[in-house]
Image: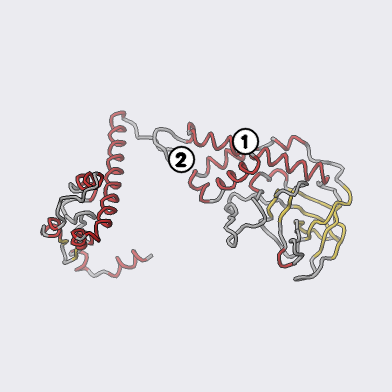
Amino acid sequence: MRAFNQSNNSTSDDKYTKAKSACSYCGDVDHQVTKCPHVKSDWAMFQSFTIPCSDPDNWTNNPKAKVVGQRYNSQANNARWFKDPNGWSKWYFACEKALGKIKKAEEREANKSKAKRTGKKAKSCGFCGGVGHNRRDCPAMEALNKRIIKANAHWRQRAYDYFVKELGLGAGALVNVGISNGWQQPDTESVGIVSKINWDELNMFCYVENDKRGWRSGKVRVHDNLQAPMLIEVVVKGETRKMVWKQQSQNNNYSNTIHLCNDQHGRPLVDVFSYSYSAVSFKSMVSPTEQPLSDEWLTQGQQECVAFITKRYSMKKLKDWGAIDLLESYEKRYNL
């Protein structure tokens, strides 16, 4: 860590001659920017479309604006530019930034005072960051839970209609699969028997908006911790392998193979998050399963899954990890 190395490389004399912390707006060492007397008056002048009448030289000429140890505060050193019209925009943004720090400091003090009066520490929600409630009564978390459950129920219905009703996919089903023969070579077809599908782990985070995703297209997948890949195992020629969907691009170029499963209407359904060269690709159904998945799967386990996600991760984390964007794109596509 750079800061750690720099602190270890300083001499003993440096430790005792370090500069005092000064105001980042006016440079005075007697106060911090959150207590600066110049900020609010200057900002009031800016809001009336008037250049503040306070002279920046009052800051730099003040001996307190020079920091101990012959180190000048950057704001005080640049204050002379504020007298030139070319520096007024810089002055404005510096004042705006300083005012923001003052408001945040005042808000913190207000929360402390409130907590002191009530004898309780002000609550802060771990999900949305709001003050005055926690995850148990967070309206944002409750609203998001309902949205995810609704979208997940819609996705599971689509998955059930295609995999179970349309294809008859399940343990014991016979499938025609393609075995890869190498780069840009046609597959060898063979018949396999489905031995396992992770139905209980599947949810709407299997979904992807379209086949163009990743860093090349700007379509970012959800984070690894939220991904719910569909894992299908088949026994082919006595060997258990994973089965994936491998659709050919429109120009029939093998280098543009799309690892994505569309439903019976050609709409994206399942993204293939992990692909193995030893995996076989689905070609067609030979014989459906004799033990199809129960329709109870449509609603089973959704509440627990959603509760786990929102209790474990914050709204910011879910947004950073792509979950909120994926949810919004799904809702928009299917008018939920």
Q: Relative to residue 175, is residue 87 drawn left or right?
A: left
Q: Residue at x 30, y 39 (%)?
A: 107
Determine the image quadrant of residue 309. Answer: top right
The label number, if any, that marks residue 128 in the structure image: 2
Q: CA distance from mark 2 to mark 1?
A: 20 Å
How many numbered markers are drawn? 2
Q: Amino acid at mark 2?
A: Cys
The label number, if any, that marks residue 303 in the structure image: 1
The quarter of the rendered structure image containing the N terminus is bottom left
Q: Amino acid at mark 1?
A: Gln
Q: Residue at x 27, y 54 (%)?
A: 94
Q: Relative to residue 7, is residue 218 drawn left or right?
A: right
Q: Nearer the viewer, residue 284 or 138?
A: 284
Check disc 1 and report its element: helix, strand or loop. Answer: helix
Q: Residue at x 58, y 44 (%)?
A: 328
Q: Relative to residue 94, is residue 184 drawn left or right?
A: right
Circle 1 Cα neighbour tier, 10 Å, few/some/many (<14 / 14–19 / ≥20): few
Residue 6 x, y percent position in the rendering: 31, 67
Asked whether the beta carbons under mark 2 and mark 1 sit within 8 Å of each other, the answer is: no
Residue 298 x, y percent position in the rendering: 72, 37
The quarter of the rendered structure image containing the C terminus is top right
Q: Residue at x 75, y 64 (%)?
A: 251
The label number, if any, that marks residue 62 in the structure image: none
Q: Residue furthest right?
A: 287
Q: Relative to residue 21, is residue 279 drawn left or right?
A: right
